[in-house]
Amino acid sequence: MRLKHRVVALFGGRRRPAPPAPARPAPAGQRPSPAVAAARPAPLPDVPPRDVRPQDAPPRDVRPPGGPGAATGDQEDPCGPSRVAVDDACSLADRMNALALASQERLRDARRAYDQHVDRRERAAAAADPRAVRAAKDEAQASFRNARLGARDQGAVETAAREWLREIDRINARTREAARLLAREHADEAGLLRAVERLGLEADGARIAAESAAEACRNARIALAACEESGRLDRGRPAASELLAPASVVARATPAPAPDAEPRGRGPQPGPDDAGPAGSASDAPPSDAGQAEAEPAILPLLAGSRDALRRIAATLAEGDAEAQRRWESRLSALVDAIRARAIDGAALTFPEDGFWAPYTQAQGREIAAALAALGYRYDGGDGFVDDRVPGQRELSLAIGYAGLDPMRIRIWPSEAELPHLYAGVEVDAGRFVAQAAGELTLGEMIDLLGRRAEELSDLWNAWGRVRPILLSPA
C-alpha cells in the first residue's frame, strides 16, 4: 500500500495541480486537520479602502500623442477620401505606365531580333542560291583561264590551278555554311514569330491597362479639385461664387477677335466699358458686368508677368519661401506648356506691317500652320525651331496651302529677311486658353495640353486650390 502511494505521488507530480476544493466548515467543537489548515490561503491584511476619484481612473483608450486616431484641434478634412483616391489611382497609373513601357521595350527587342533573323536568313539564302554559286564558280574558272593564257611557264600554270582550287573550296565552304545557317534560321523563325505575337498582345494589354489607370487618375483628380473648390465655397471665400459660374471668367475677360472679313488693322482693344461685339461686357447682363471688368490672374501670367507669377505662387505657398519657389517652377512649366500648345495651334497675333500686312489674322494663322506642316515651326520668339528657315519656294507653297494665290503677293521677303519672318509675331496664349479651356477645369486643361500634361502631375493634384486663384481677379 505504501508503494502504491509512492507511485501515485510520482506520476501525479507531473500533472497540473487541481485547484483546491473549498474547505468545508468544521463541525462545532472540532478542530480542522493540519492538511486542511495548510491548504487554506492566508487571510489578507486589513487595508483601508482607497478613495478612488473619477479623475484618478486611467483613460479607457490611451494613444500616443500624434499617432493614428489622436484627437487634434483641426476639423476633419472633407476631401481626405478624395486625396487618398488620387494617391491610389495615380500611383497605380504610374505603375501601369511603367509596365506598359517595359512591355513596349520587350516588344521592340523581339521585333529587333526578328528583323536581325530576317536579315541573316536573306543573306544566307543569297549565299546558298545555286545561281549565285554557279556564277561564283564561273568567275573563278574565268580567272584561271586568264591566268593560264598569260602564264609563261608551267610553274605559273600550276599556281593558277592551285588558286582556282582554293577559290572553289572557299565557295563550297561558304555554300555549306550558308545552308546550315539557313536551316537554323528556318527552325528559329516560328519561335520568333510566336514571341513577337505574344509580346504584341501583352503590350496591347498593358497599354490598355495604363490608359484605363490614367483615366481613373484623371477622374480622381477632377473629383478632388471639385471637392476643394466646394470647400472654398462652403467657407465663403471672396469671389468664390464667380469661380464656378457657368460662363467662363477667362472667356468673358478676353476680347473677342475681330471679324476676318475686315482689314487687319490693329487698333487699341476695346475696354470693358466700350461697345463691342456680342458676348462683350456691353451685352452682358448687369450681374456679370463686374465679373467682365475683372481680368483673371491667368491672363497676365500667360502674358509673362513676373509680378503675377510671384503673387500667385505666394498665395499658394501661404508664407513658405521654399514652397513659393516650387510653385513658381510649377506655374512656369504650366505657362511654357500652354504657350507651346498655342504655337502648335497657330494661336498667333501678327503685326500690321511687313510681310503679314496684306493678310487677315485668320490668313496669317493658316500660313503659319502650313509652314509648320512643312517642317518650319515658329519658336515662340522671332525665328524658327532648330534654325530651320524656309526658302521662298516653301513660303510660296505655304501660301498656296492656305488657299491664297502666291502670284498675287507683291511683298516677298528676301533671303536675308526670311530668318526673321516672325519678327513682331506674338503668341496669343490667353485667347487660346479662353477658346479651348475657358473654364480651366482639370479635364479641359489635360485635354488641352495632351502629352505635355504628364509632366505637371504635382500641379494637377492641387488644381482645386490653383484654379480658383488663376480665375480670381488679377
Image: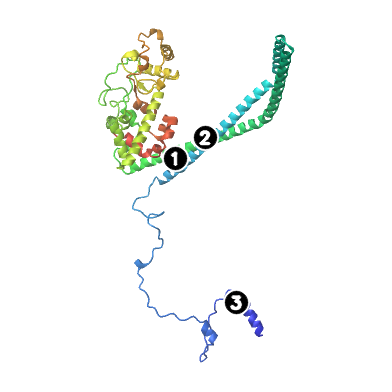
Give the camera-side residue of 466 and 124: 124
Is residue 287 at least partly visible in the picture?
Answer: no
Q: Which mark is residue 433?
A: none
Identify the amino acid type marked 2: Leu
Location of the C terminus by quadrant is top left
Q: Secondary structure at mark 3?
A: loop
Residue at the spot of label 2: 101
For label 1, the crowd category at 10 Å Cα-Cα, with few meaning under 14, some 14 to 19 and many 20 or more, is many
Q: Is residue 206 above or below residue 278?
A: below
Read off the residue under disc 3. 13
Residue 390 is drawn in which quadrant? Answer: top left
Residue hosting label 1: 220
Q: Quadrant of the N terminus?
A: bottom right
| Foreground label between 1 and 3 | 3
> What SS does tag 2 mark?
helix
Q: Is residue 344 above or below residue 107?
A: above
In-front residue for pair 403/173: 173
| Inter-mark Cα distance, 3 to 2 | 71 Å
What's the coloring here? rainbow
State if disc 2 and disc 1 touch (CB < 8 Å): no
Mark toward the viewer: 1 or 2: 2
Relative image position of residue 98 (x, y in whole percent): 50, 37
| Mark 1 vs mark 2, CA separation in Å | 23 Å
Q: Give the residue type at disc 3.
A: Gly
Give the structural element (helix, strand or loop) at label 1: helix
| Residue depicted at 51% across the width and 85% down the height | 37
